[in-house]
Amino acid sequence: MSFDLVAPDGGASGWLARNRVGLTIAATIALAASFMAEHYGAPAMLFALLIGMAFNFLATDSRAAGGIDAASKLLLRVGVALLGLRLTFDSVAELGLAPIVGVATLLCLTLCIGIAAARLIGRSLAFGLLSGGAVAICGASAALAIASVIPKRHLNEQDVLFTVVGVTAQSTMAMILYPMIFGALHLDDLQSGYLIGATIHDVAQVVGAGYSISDRAGDIATFTKLVRVALLPVVLLVIAIVYRNDSGGKVGLPWFVVVFIALMLLRNFLTLPALLLTLCDSVSRFLLLTAISALGVKTSLMQLTAAGPRNFGAVAGITLALLGMALVAVECGLV
């Protein structure tokens, strides 16, 4: 779940030298997406994803692969961390305590639905926890984290791979479709942001979908999503207890969530220069756009359709159940 910030073999300069090709490609796509968004009025995040997918063949190029991967992971996390400077206590208070409790409730219900769906198709408890946790928390990252605490004899690598592919595919589709669905339902920015943050699997797609609606929706979506991510250690601990796993692995918050919270506190307790806030906001936006571009390059339509039908169907069912529950919660006045 965490990403190693230490650049081996040569420090930061060596890391940049090794990854410059992939980083340059992602940044160039981000600039192109920004240019097209300004001239055609469509969301830059969507342009970045679609243009990136057209360059999927570069994802397997040895010269570019490392930089593309770094852009989709490290730059994304740095960009999300910097978003902490955008959030004020007023915007969090606007969301209220009930929606935060609602996120935790939705997470628990989604895990239960995952277990039930696995039993329904004749799969194990481990597969239910894997698929349910991936949908409930943070997609592929959660799937890999959960797989790391489940004993190997209960879960095979193919199930993990198909689950990762399934949640990645559906998260990408959700990034494109959910803003249109919520717009058709005439939901406001607060409601749309909350639903995106509470239902889309991966952080990158949450950011892309949220900010494609508005800055306010993007801020709320990011905060809501990070509440889900913050619950990952709790889920891992419970799963470790269930399986009595003595792997000794550490369970903690991802570093970018810690930095996000620290910057949010800094923003609210200190008076920071407006120029600094504007600069950090611009840097964050470009890093996120670059990360989405890299994510597009890594997205293969062939791989998205390669997931096993049972695995894909289970993940799809859990995803729709989460969306349905979240919509009901919003309609009942939770947000």
Image: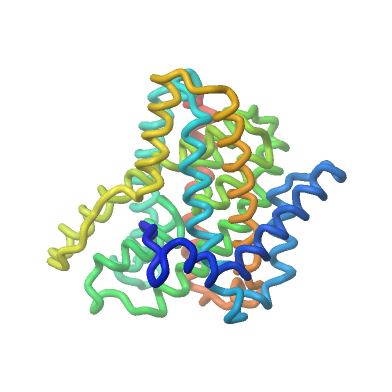
Residue at the limit of the structure toward the right, as seen here:
39
- Vertical position of residue 271 compared to residue 107: above or below: above
- Quarter of the image where one finds residue 217: top right
Q: Is residue 320 visible?
A: no
- Vertical position of residue 63 compared to residue 222: above or below: below
Q: Is residue 6 visible?
A: yes
**Front residue (pair 323, 234):** 234
Q: Position of residue 28 (x, y in %)?
A: 72, 59
Look at the image and tell me in which quarter the N terminus lies: bottom left
Give me the residue at 70% from left, 54% from top.
Answer: 30
Q: Where is residue 19 in the image (x, y as percent from the top left)?
A: 55, 69
Coloured how? Answer: rainbow
| Side of 188 where 12 appears, left or right | left
**Front residue (pair 300, 278):** 278
Q: Position of residue 153 (x, y in %)?
A: 23, 79
Q: Position of residue 6 (x, y in %)?
A: 37, 61
